[in-house]
Amino acid sequence: MTEQQEPIEALERRNFFTRVIAAVHIAIGGTLAFVLGGAVLAPSFERRESTWLRAGRFGILRNNEPLTVTLRVARQDGYAQVVDGPPPAALASFPTRLDGDEVMVQV
């Protein structure tokens, strides 16, 4: 081999390794984007079925007096839990119905 051929072969080898490293970086970045994007966007595409929950008996309600009722519904979302500070949104209002003497709330 001549002295001219060795640098050319070294450059070709270096370009090959550069392309391999770039391909690995692209694969890692694509995988991370897919996983993290799915974790954030998946809950917004999930179909939520409405459910009627029992909120209490109609007989305990008084006219013009609010009654605190706590309903807990576990839902997956892509956002962090608010630990301190003002609420992120106003209190939600839900459709209600009477089922005999039971007050039902649709969530």
Image (spheres, grey):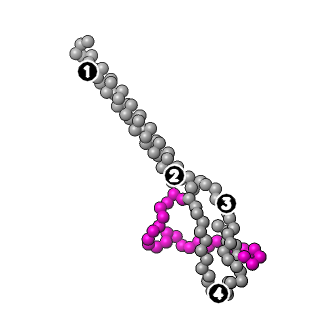
Q: Is 84 contained in the magenta span?
A: yes
Q: Earlier in the sequence, mark 2 or mark 3?
A: 2
Residue 95 visible to the viewer: no
The x and y percentages for residue 8 are 28, 20
Depth order, front residue of 94/101 = 101
Of tags 1 and 4, which is closer to the observer? 4
Cα gap from disc 2 to disc 1, whole angstroms: 48 Å
Q: Residues within 10 Å of mark 1 (few under 14, many from 20)?
A: few
The x and y percentages for residue 95 are 67, 71
Cα gap from disc 1 to disc 3, whole angstroms: 67 Å
Cα gap from disc 1 to disc 4, whole angstroms: 90 Å
**Residues at circles 1 and 4 in contact by the CB criterion of under 8 Å:** no
Specify the quadrant of the image occupied by residue 25: top left
The x and y percentages for residue 27 are 44, 38
Reading the image, the residue beneath label 2 is: 39
Cα gap from disc 3 to disc 4, whole angstroms: 32 Å
Cα gap from disc 4 to disc 2, whole angstroms: 44 Å
The x and y percentages for residue 58 are 71, 80
- For the record, the magenta segment spans 77-102
- Taking the view exactly as shown, the residue that stands out farthest to the right is 100
The amino acid at mark 4 is Asn
Question: Is disc 1 placed on a helix, strand or loop?
Answer: helix
* Label of residue 51 in the image: none
Q: Earlier in the sequence, mark 3 or mark 4?
A: 3
The amino acid at mark 3 is Glu
Q: Earlier in the sequence, mark 2 or mark 1?
A: 1
Q: Earlier in the sequence, mark 1 or mark 4?
A: 1
**Residues at circles 3 and 4 in contact by the CB criterion of under 8 Å:** no
Question: Is disc 2 placed on a helix, strand or loop?
Answer: helix
